Image: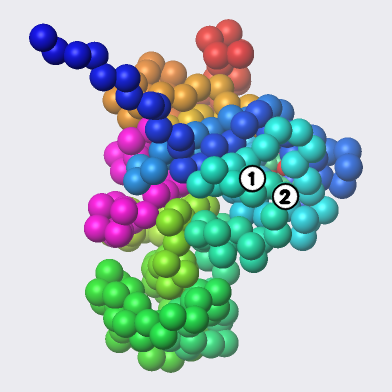
Amino acid sequence: MTQAVQLKPEVPLLSINNIEVVYDDVIQVLRGVSIDVPRGEIVTLLGPNGAGKSTTLKAISGLLKTENGEVSRGDIHFMGERIDVKNAEDVVRSGLFQVMEGRRIVEDMSVIENLKLGAYTRNDGQVNQDIEMVFNYFPRLKERIGLAGYLSGGEQQMLAIGRALMARPKMICLDEPSMGLSPLLVKEVFGIIEKINREQGITMLLVEQNANYALKAANYGYIMESGKIVLDGSKEMLLNNEDVKEFYLGGGNEKRKSFKNLKSYKRRKRWL
Ligand SMILES: Nc1ncnc2c1ncn2[C@@H]1O[C@H](COP(=O)(O)OP(=O)(O)OP(=O)(O)O)[C@@H](O)[C@H]1O
Ligand SMILES: [Mg+2]
């Protein structure tokens, strides 16, 4: 006779529980956002400009304080530990690294110096070995020996991801890695993100406007609009959802622009 085994549901690696974020004590941007990121998975957070995606990432990585923002309600746990009360450096030490929007590399330093910056929280003597590991993922960075400021946009994005790897994180949050890249480079960068996830087992939270690529890479997705999660589901569910197809996976920008008004009307009806 088979016996029913009671499996404990696994606690997500990162768990955002009903957070609100306020800037300058008055501007409320997030209104009760909850997101779970299971260990080893890629989860994507999608949404239009100004939805609150970067704010969500800054809340996770302790970067709100530098912008006079705060998590005014709810909490965030990483590996069972509460992190919304920690400063940015302690969050990195706990194993969570953010690749910020716009790449933020140090332009007047070399590629190798930038990579070493990523390892500042470590003192295990394996930094040189890890630089080689980064060059394995991004071979073209190895050929660029000048200042990082001379790198192309795609190469700078690669350097920013490489620098995150240097921290040996358990999880990386990426803010719009596809921004400003050609379609070919977007494909390449996403391919490497998936490879890193697969080979290093690093959990990823991927913020994107490019839903096509993000949903291919991710296992699960959340859609945020005006500071709220309006829809979430598995990759398959979202790829087959009519609204997602129409507004996030649809054809060119032209079509999307002309649907703008209809879009907010329909969404209110269907999702909110
Ligand atoms: N430091 C700040 N002070 C006040 N308001 C802010 C601050 N940063 C962001 N906001 C506001 O919060 C809202 C969400 O911004 P956020 O950058 O999180 O959006 P986003 O989804 O990342 O947008 P995008 O796709 O354009 O990057 C916007 O209305 C923005 O103007
Ligand atoms: Mg943003």
Left or right: where 96 falls relative to 141: right
Q: Please say whether residue 210 is one of the residues in the magenta stretch.
A: yes
Q: Residue furthest right?
A: 25
**Mark 1 is on which residue type?**
Arg
Whether residue 121 is visible, yes or no, is yes
Which residue is the site of mark 2? 85
Q: Which residues are magenta?
A: 192-220
**Mark 2 is on which residue type?**
Val
Find residue 82 and name its label.
1
> At x 36% / y 86%, what residue is drawn?
128
Q: Nearer the viewer, residue 54 or 121?
A: 121
Q: Are marks 1 and 2 in contact (CB under 8 Å)?
A: yes
Left or right: where 216 falls relative to 100: left
> At x 24% / y 58%, what residue is drawn?
199
> At x 26% / y 52%, what residue is drawn?
198
Q: Nearer the viewer, residue 74 or 139?
A: 74
Find residue 59 and name its label.
none
Write down the quadrant of residue 30 in the picture.
top right
Classify 163 as above or below 211. Answer: below
> At x 27% / y 69%, what residue is drawn?
137
Q: Secondary structure at mark 2?
A: loop
Q: Residue furthest bottom?
A: 146
Q: Secondary structure at mark 1?
A: strand
**Residue 142, horizontal then vertical, whole percent:** 31, 84
**Residue 98, horizontal then vertical, whole percent:** 54, 58
Q: CA distance from mark 1 to mark 2?
A: 7 Å
Question: What quarter of the picture does the N terminus occupy?
Answer: top left
Question: What quarter of the picture does the C terminus occupy?
Answer: top right
Write down the quadrant of residue 50 in the picture.
top right
